[in-house]
Amino acid sequence: MNKKLNILLIILLASSVAIAAEKGIHGVTKSSHQPAKALSHKRMKRPQMSGVYSVDLISNNGRVHLLTGMQQDGKKSLWYRYSNDGGQHWSDSHKVLNNDDLAIRASRGNDAQITVQGKSIVVTWTKFDPAVRFNSGPMQAARSVNGGKSWQTSATPPDWKKGPHGFADMASDDQYMHAVWLDSRPINNQEKGQQGVRYARSNDGGLSWQKNLTVDSYSCSCCWNTVETDGKNNTYVLYRDKNPSDLSIGLINNQQQWKYLSHVGDFNWQFDGCPHIGGGLAFQTVLGNQRLHSVVGTAHPEHLGVYYLQSDDAGKNWSSAKQLGNESAIHSDIAAHDNGRVIAVWDMMAENGLATFFAESKDHGNNWSEAEQLSDPHMRATHPRIVKTVKGFLAVWTQSNGQQQRLVMKEL
């Protein structure tokens, strides 16, 4: 068996573990025309790892906001805190909805999400519903207007309320909160719809959400989506397409009109499964112009790994793909400062198993340092995230010993 096939099997095995842990809206691929077997709606009995099961963080006006999902004795909760100095010091943690046992369906790669606009903080997650197939229900939301000290249930972005909804992401600008997610709502009087990418925005800090827009009616079923705003009333959505299964990007303008732009990395990967591999976006000003940075993951046999690309024409065209790390790299994220620094983070196989790495560019993404390991040896580290801060960058990831999973962070 050759090296590339071995690495591909490692990647797909890592994905299958995520699928087993979070078998929700992606339980059956759309490309398979075989009828699904009847499954019990009872909660599956399997050993559950305690500790951190979900992480999301954003940077907003110099403040870093962190949403962490905690699990103990089978009970799940969400916790919020913030830092004004790039992660050196943190506010007190506050429990979302003051609930020790949220009905939540989340895992790394399908994390609960947070966004902030002014005094409004909104978090969303997929409901755990034991009465439905795969226990994956509709989106839920909570909102705080006092710095996360107290929370109330709130309106959710989807106007198709039945669900399941999953793999959401949120962002904010001065005008709107933005949300993207996957669901399989019926379209044109169909009995059952295909999995597609949906978008909604709110102009009142998450109190209500406007009519949904279908970004792509046929997408991958189980890869996380990324939504980012450029400060110029454009909202970019990065998602995994089908036929081919490369990551696609498009933008939604201020009139809520969608425009498809391109594939980010033209790998021509044809895959009929659930890879659980997304990507990341970051904006940077270069000589007065806007540069768009992206990291994308692919398991194409000839292009295994994570790649960095940049665009100077708002996502229409991209540079050649530069590989970060080796062929076992899977999940990645990226952040940029206007001073020229760009940092990418990802996980890949190291001597002691799956580990988190980073590389840095000091010249707007043109040249990159060698990869350096961030995570502790002898721990399984996965799904790193990174944001820019007032002092530099903050990277976070989760690592486990097989029984307890914890959140780790590092200033860069």
Image: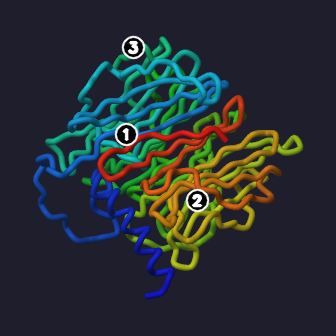
Contact, CB < 8 Å: mark 3 with mark 2? no
Q: Give the residue at mark 2.
A: 296
Vertical comparison of 299 with 293: above or below:
below
Q: Give the residue at mark 1.
A: 52
Q: Measured from the top left, where is residue 189 in percent x and y? A: 30, 50
Residue 183 horizontal side relative to residue 362, left or right: left
Q: Secondary structure at mark 3?
A: loop
What residue is at 43 percent from the left and 13 percent from the top? 149
Q: Secondary structure at mark 1?
A: strand
Task: Give the mark nearest the N terminus, 3 or 2.
Answer: 3
Q: Secondary structure at mark 2?
A: strand
Task: Give the mark nearest the N terminus, 1 or 3.
Answer: 1
Separation of residues labelled 3 and 2 (CA atoms):
37 Å
Q: Measured from the top left, where is residue 27 in percent x and y? A: 28, 58
Residues packed near mark 3 inside 10 Å, few (<14), some (14 to 19) or many (20 plus):
some
Vertical comparison of 305 with 223: above or below:
below
Which amino acid does the dot numbered 3 rest on?
Answer: Ser
Of all residues shown, which one is farthest toward the bottom?
A: 1
What residue is at 44 percent from the left and 23 percent from the top? 208
Residues packed near mark 2 inside 10 Å, few (<14), some (14 to 19) or many (20 plus):
many
Of all residues shown, which one is farthest toward the top?
A: 146
Q: Measured from the top left, where is residue 281 in percent x and y? A: 63, 48
Separation of residues labelled 2 and 1 (CA atoms):
25 Å
Which amino acid does the dot numbered 1 rest on?
Answer: Val
**Which label is found at residue 150?**
3
Task: Give the mark nearest the N terminus, 2 or 1.
Answer: 1
Between 401 and 296, the one lying in front of the other is 401
